[in-house]
Amino acid sequence: MAFGLVEDPLDDKERSKVAGTCVADLKLPMPALVDGVDDKVGRMYGGWPDRLYLIGKDGKIAFAGAQGPAGFDPGAWEQAIVAEKARMAEAAKKAPAEPPSEKPVGPKR
């Protein structure tokens, strides 16, 4: 697969289009979030030059890798993914059953 250089997008729509092409070309099996052209999220999380994060289903940071390239550690990120999936499975086992519906059951009259 050949990849070429991409001009820096000028607006959010253009950046989303470039990101969508990247996700499709790389056949990424996960959702991808795209920072705006203002790079607000990248600046908040120190995402330059490389940084891996894992956001749990609860919306909390489950893994924050060190800044790259020296801190770029896909193995540690993978271990965090496995641990987060196990945590989610355990939480699902402990979750209370759904409360009974307050809607009447049976045929309408």
Image: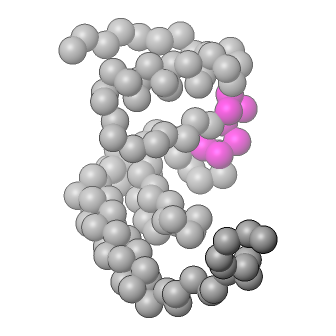
Whether residue 19 sits left or right of residue 87 in the image: it is: right
Q: Nearer the viewer, residue 69 or 32?
A: 32
Q: Which percent across, then down, holds residue 45?
A: 59, 53
Residue at 63% across, 86% down: 100
Q: Quadrant of the C terminus?
A: bottom right
Q: Nearer the viewer, residue 31 or 101?
A: 101
Q: Which percent across, then down, holds residue 85?
A: 34, 69
Whether residue 108 sits left or right of residue 21 in the image: it is: right
Whether residue 37 sits left or right of residue 72 in the image: it is: right
Residue 39 included in the magenta stretch of the image: yes
Residue at 74% across, 69% down: 108
Quick check: 29 above or below 53?
A: above
Q: Quadrant of the N terminus?
A: top left
Residue at 66% across, 52% down: 44
The residues colored magenta run 36-43
Whether residue 98 sits left or right of residue 78 in the image: it is: right
Q: Nearer the viewer, residue 109 or 66?
A: 109
Q: Is residue 39 visible?
A: yes
Q: Which percent across, then down, holds residue 11?
A: 71, 19
